[in-house]
Image (cartoon, rainbow, N blue to C red):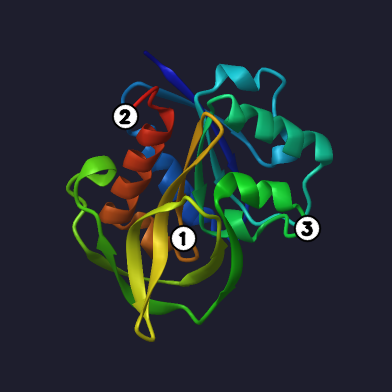
Amino acid sequence: MLRKILLVTSGLFHPPYFGRMAVHLALKSMDGFAFQHISALGKLPANLGDFSAMVLYFHHKTIPDAALKQLEGFVSSGGGILAIHSATASFKAAKGYFDILGGRFSGHGPVQDFEIVGQQTGIFDGVMPFRIKDELYLHELQPGIEVHYTASLQGQHIPVVWTYRYGRGKICYAAPGHTVESMKHPAMQEILRQGLKWTCRDDD
C-alpha cells in the first residue's frame, strides 16, 4: 500500500535549508511512501484526507483558523503527524495546535553537545544512544505523551522524542533540528523514518 505524505516545510536559517533537505532525502528513501511538498499549513490541499500523514518542520508565527480546523480534523480522524524541532515553537497563540502535538515550546539554551538516550526496541527498534550538537528544547507537555528518548540537563531527563495520540491520530515529535549536522546524523534520520512509519500504521 502506497502511503501519501504531505511535507509542510520552509526556512533558510531556522530551520536550516540544508537540514530540511537532509530530512527530505532521508524520508524519501523509504519504500512505499510518496511525498508532496507545501510551504505552510495555510496552503493545505482540499484533498487532505488522501494523505496518511504530514511532516511539520517550520517556524511560523500565525496559522489561519480554517487551517487549524482542517489540521485538527485530519488528525482526530486518523491522520498522522511527524513534527520536528521548531514546529512546537510555532503558532504560540493557538492553544489547539499544541493540544494536537502534545507539547508547547517553552525555551532552550545555547547550541550544545548532548547525548540522546532511551528506547531501543518497539517503535524505534535498534536506534542506540548517540550524540549531536543542537538546541535542547524545553516544553510544556500534555498528559499522555510517551517519552522515548531523553537528554540530560542539570540532572534532569529532558524529553527529546515523544509519541502521542490525538483522537484516532498518532503524533511523533523530535526536538533536534536547529543544525544541519544533527539532521544528517544517521541515528536521527532513522528515528524520523521510524517515527513517520508509526504515525501511518493502522494499528500497533
Between circles 2 and 3, the one closer to the viewer is: 2
Residue position marked by numbered label 2 in the rendering: 204
Q: Nearer the viewer, residue 47 or 74?
A: 74
- Name the mark on residue 16: none
Quarter the N terminus occupies = top left
Amino acid on which the number 2 mark rests in the picture: Asp
Amino acid on which the number 1 mark rests in the picture: Ala
Going by the image, does 27 lie left or right of 131? right
Identity of the residue drawn at 66% across and 17% down:
47
Q: CA distance from mark 1 to mark 3?
A: 20 Å
Identity of the residue drawn at 32% across and 60% down:
149
> In the image, is residue 81 above or below residue 163?
above
Ranked by sequence position, the earlier of labels 1 and 2 is: 1
* Coordinates of residue 106 in the picture (x, y in percent): 61, 70
Identity of the residue drawn at 66% across and 41% down:
39
Q: Nearer the viewer, residue 37 or 153?
A: 153
Ranked by sequence position, the earlier of labels 1 and 3 is: 3
Amino acid on which the number 3 mark rests in the picture: Ala
SS category of the residue bearing label 1: loop
Residue position marked by numbered label 3 in the rendering: 93
